[in-house]
Image (cartoon, rainbow, N blue to C red):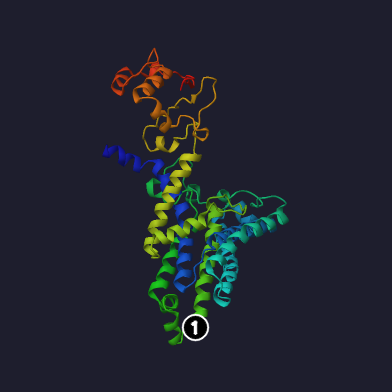
Amino acid sequence: MMETLFENLTSGSMVFLIRQTLIYAVPLMVVALAGVYAERSGVINLALEGIMIFGAFIGVLFVNLVQQWGWFDAAKAAGDWVSLQGFMLLTMAVAALLGAVFSLLLAFAAINLRADQTIGGTALNLMAPALVLFFIRLIANQNTLQMYTGDSASWFMLRKSMFGYGRTEDMGFLGETFVNRVYPVTYLCILLFIILSVILYKTRFGLRLRSCGENPQASDSLGINVMAMRYAGVTISGALAGMGGFLYALTTANCQSNGDVAGFGFLALAVMIFGNWKPLNVAGAAMLFGMFKCIAASYASLDINGDGVYLLRELGYPAPRYCHIPLLTDAQGRRLAKRDRDLDLSALSRRYTPQRLLGMLAHAAGLLEEDRPADLEELTALFDWSKVRRGDLRLPDWL
């Protein structure tokens, strides 16, 4: 069994699982850190979902415009993947910048106006999809904004051919997992996560930021500008959320924006809380949530044979078997339902014994030739799948 498990762990299915887990986990990791920065400064940023939506829109719009202007057409035609990665980094910076600007709405409301932070974040979450859809309809005259030409994989994804490998050549487990068919910006975001975590907990700036969130009066008495530090925390939070929004659109939505990020902003809040607002714990929680998201998406969408068990077969496990329980109907064929007070057990138990009810159901199912009382032991001995009727079970009128 252990040998089979090891073979499964080093198979192509596990390569796929790890690669897809990173795709889902890294945006969660970055956006959860955005929430940590805001909350450590003393502002609860519930607008992560809205800022992600706005950042995804800005990033896709920038890619679309640059493609129309033809700035990187020569690099794409020549296969200059280094220039294309520079294009992607530039887009990430633009998404982060506009995400920071968008977050200033929350900062102004929460810091200057002292408005309720929960209401302010909810308002931005409601405003962002409507605003994005309005601009998409204005720009593209449809409900989805996408790349002007090609797709995200053909423009930004690394492939083994870029390193001299043929289509059928194997790069080994590490190469196939972490180099082939991955987005380099994933590793950049992981590096950025580490750097910002160190800044938050190992630098003077991070200490001042956290002190303003934990005890603003004491910080102010020491000469720290609490308002400026809170603006800094929310701005960094907005930049990370905007970056995470475009990262989601790039790696998960094929560089498209439709005013939705599939709830990743709210999921990032859950990751932040699950990780207890500590970067290392947040990273672990993001990986855990990303793995679950990957398994769910793979099980639901990668349905090669139409049976929904692709991932199980790839991992070497047997597919589950499903059985349909026949419906219960009355003598006229009407489906019985609780909402119509059919088969109310409290009423039936006052009128009939359990043996009478079991015998009636067994007769309707085909296990007994006549309608008579029966106990569980008798029916267990008589049970045979070949006797069970394939159609709906019609119950007698006397019931």
Q: Which of 223/283 is in front?
A: 223
* Residue 179, x across and y down, in percent: 44, 51
Identify the residue at the far top of this view: 369
Q: Residue 96 lies in what quarter of the image?
A: bottom right
Q: Which of 239/90 is in front?
A: 239
Residue at 43% across, 31% down = 347
Q: Residue 4 lies in what quarter of the image?
A: top left
Using residue 284 as the reference point, say whether residue 251 is left or right of it: right
Element on which disc 1 rests: loop
Using residue 379 as the reference point, say whether residue 398 is left or right of it: right
Tell me the quadrant of the picture where the N terminus can be found: top left
Give the amino acid type for the residue marked by disc 1 in the picture. Asn
Q: Which of 123/85 is in front?
A: 123
Residue at 42% across, 52% down = 289
Q: Which of 293/122 is in front?
A: 122
Count of all numbered marks drawn on residues in the image: 1
* Residue 134, x across and y down, in percent: 69, 57
Against 13, residue 47 (above or below) is below
Using residue 65 as the reference point, say whether residue 168 is left or right of it: left
Using residue 143 as the reference point, say whether residue 163 is left or right of it: left
* Residue 109, x across and y down, in percent: 58, 72
Q: Do we see residue 303 in this rendering?
A: yes
- Residue at the disc numbered 1: 225
Residue at 38% across, 63% down = 276
* Residue 277, x across and y down, in percent: 40, 65
